[in-house]
Image (tube, rainbow, N blue to C red):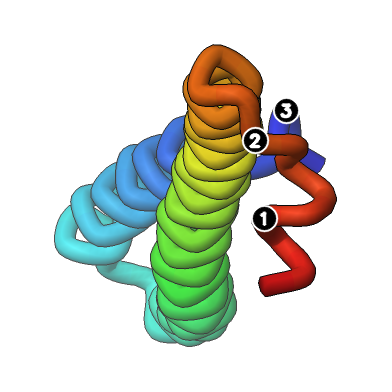
Amino acid sequence: MITQAATLPNRVDTIRARLAVLVDAANEEHDPASRIVLKHQMDCLRSALRLAERADGMARDIAATANKLVRTAQSQREREEALKRLDATIARELRGAGIDAQQHAER
């Protein structure tokens, strides 16, 4: 999925390039039947371009959300680790003061 999302901008650029070639060909074509065929091909490519651009935007949104989730998970782990260190420090300090951490927690 990530690999496919990374190739979407390339597909958008490819479709744009093909569309530009068709536009040039349609402008140079004098045969009405050929112009109709080229116009139809351009319409199809324009639709494909809109879909590819939309898919590219969605892929970027998904990647941004995934990155936020990864950062949130890392922050959550860091908070949990910090709380464990704090608990261990408090327990050491209480033991040093002659107080059992379990008894202190019960109070």
Residue 17's disc is: none
Q: In the picture, residue 55 is in which quadrant?
A: bottom right
41 lies above or below 43: above
Structural distance between the alpha carbons of marks 1 and 3: 54 Å
Q: For the point 56% across and 48% down, which residue is it?
A: 76
Horizontally, residue 82 falls left or right of residue 81, namely left
Q: Nearer the viewer, residue 46 or 106?
A: 106
Q: Which residue is mark 3?
A: 3
Residue 99's disc is: 2
Quadrant of the image containing the N terminus:
top right
Query: Which comes before the other along the chain, label 2 or label 1?
Result: 2
Structural distance between the alpha carbons of marks 2 and 3: 57 Å
Q: For the point 64% across and 21% down, which residue is it?
A: 95
Q: Which residue is mark 1?
A: 104
Horizontally, residue 77 falls left or right of residue 10, namely right
Query: Which comes before the other along the chain, label 2 or label 3?
Result: 3
Q: Residue 96 at x, y = what percent?
A: 54, 14
Asked which secondary structure carries label 2, the reply is loop
Query: Which comes before the other along the chain, label 1 or label 3?
Result: 3
Q: For the point 44% across and 53% down, which residue is it?
A: 68
**Residue type at numbered disc 2:** Ile
